[in-house]
Image (cartoon, helix red, strand yellow):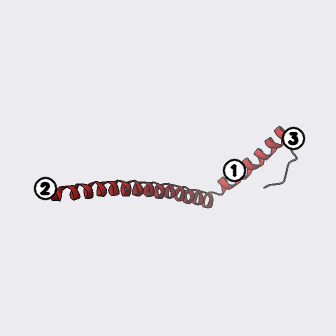
Amino acid sequence: MITDSPPDVQLSRSSDADMLELNTELERMADAVENQTVQVTWMAHDMVVLRTSPEVVDSMRELQEAYLRCKSAVYGEPESGAA
């Protein structure tokens, strides 16, 4: 029985290292999927808001025009049309 211990211990250490590596990789993959899910959720939210509230689109257009006017005033660039 004593002769069986060293291979079992070595196998156990190898198995532990493999499990740790696997757990680390699975955690990294889960984090990546979670980040993508958050991005898709925000994209869906933005699409719903833009499609259901035309006032938001108009406000965003006015904000873009105001930004371009301010940029022109600060940097002296000619105003371009609506982008």
Q: Helix, strand or loop at disc 1? A: helix
Dot label at residue 2: 2
Q: How far apart, in angstroms, are the residues tagged by discs 1 and 3? A: 25 Å
Amino acid found under the numbered disc labelled 1: Ser
Between 2 and 17, the one lying in front of the other is: 2
Q: Earlier in the sequence, mark 2 or mark 1?
A: 2
User: How many discs mark residues in the rendered view?
Assistant: 3
Dot label at residue 22: none
Mark 1 = which residue?
A: 59
Q: How far apart, in angstroms, are the residues tagged by discs 3 and 2? A: 85 Å
Q: Earlier in the sequence, mark 3 or mark 2?
A: 2
Mark 3 = which residue?
A: 76
In the depicted structure, whether residue 22 falls above or below residue 68:
below
User: Would residue 15 appear left or right of 27 to someone viewing this image?
Assistant: left
Amino acid found under the numbered disc labelled 3: Gly
Q: Position of residue 66 (x, y in %)?
A: 77, 45
Q: Position of residue 71 (x, y in %)?
A: 80, 42
Amino acid found under the numbered disc labelled 2: Ile
